[in-house]
Amino acid sequence: MNVSPIMQRYAAEIYRLQQDLDPVPLSMLTQSVDASMQAVSKMVRRLVKGGYLQHEPYRGVRLTPAGERLAMPSLRRHRIAEVFLVRIMGYDWATAHELTDQFERGVNDLLEDRMFEMCGHPTRCPHGEPIPSKDGVMPQVDDVPLVEVPSGSDCVISRVRTHDIAKLRYIASLGLVPGIAFHLASCAPFKGPLRLQINPQDQVIGYELAQAFWVEVKRLGKGNKLPPEYSER
């Protein structure tokens, strides 16, 4: 079966969605790719036929190992494009997120390689998501949801996992971007607010917003030195 760019984009979107929900309901996929249920169902049948997808009726879809491999080139291009729009073209991460879907469709392998070089060979996108290697290997990230971290922990923001534009802009205004170190001073019970100690001032965020953050739990020690992968930010 010939693989089309749209098949890769669908696989990439399913890969992203199933990080939080497995299997992925077709209604969620329809909303995410902004297509009709008829169009999505047709593409799902095509991916199932090609061995890239498993479909559980009334539950949803999940990628096969072949489907995960199919997703990698599109994920890589998308995340490199986001880095390029932020680092080279100067867009904020929310605007870059809005532009990337259309921008990346005009990018071929040659342009992708040049953008990757101009951006300094990034390992993560502006939201902290890892960028697959050229040969389709997704780097492992050792992080956990912030809402599962006990009070008193020293953390580094690893990923900001939301595609909500308003949330992205608000999070940026608070300075809570990947690479920022903080001390989790308190977590109020019953899904109450969290207090993050960050020099020069604390930030208090609600539980709903906190669910967007994934963090590396560390004892940073003297000088709050960040891990090497954040030195490029």
Image (cartoon, rainbow, N blue to C red):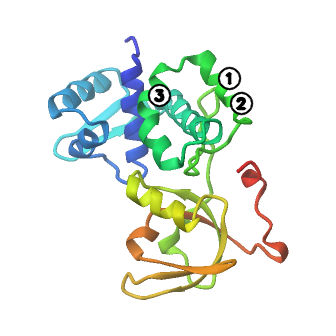
- In the rendered image, the residue lying farthest to the right is 222
Q: Which residue is located at x 42 percent, y 68 percent?
A: 209
Q: Nearer the viewer, residue 65 or 119?
A: 119
Q: Nearer the viewer, residue 63 or 7?
A: 7
Residue highlighted by disc 2? 118
Q: How many C-alpha atoms fall within 10 Å of the one at disc 2: few (<14), some, or many (≥20)?
A: some
The amino acid sitting under disc 2 is Met
SS for tag 3? helix
- How far separated are the C-alphas under marks 3 and 2? 17 Å
SS for tag 1? helix
SS for tag 2? helix
Picture layout, residue 199 above or below residue 167 = below
Q: Which residue is located at x 25 percent, y 43 percent?
A: 31
- Residue 228: x and y in percent read 78, 54
- The answer to whether marks 2 and 1 mark residues whose Cβ atoms lie closer than 8 Å is yes
The answer to which of marks 3 and 2 sits earlier in the sequence is 3
Residue 114, disc: 1
Residue highlighted by disc 3? 103
- Residue 45: x and y in percent read 24, 25
The amino acid sitting under disc 3 is Phe
Q: Which residue is located at x 53 percent, y 60 percent?
A: 172
Left or right: where 222 falls relative to 63: right
Picture layout, residue 230 above or below residue 194 = above
Question: Which part of the image, by quadrant, shows the N terminus?
Answer: top left
- Residue 124: x and y in percent read 63, 45
- In the rendered image, the residue lying farthest to the top is 2
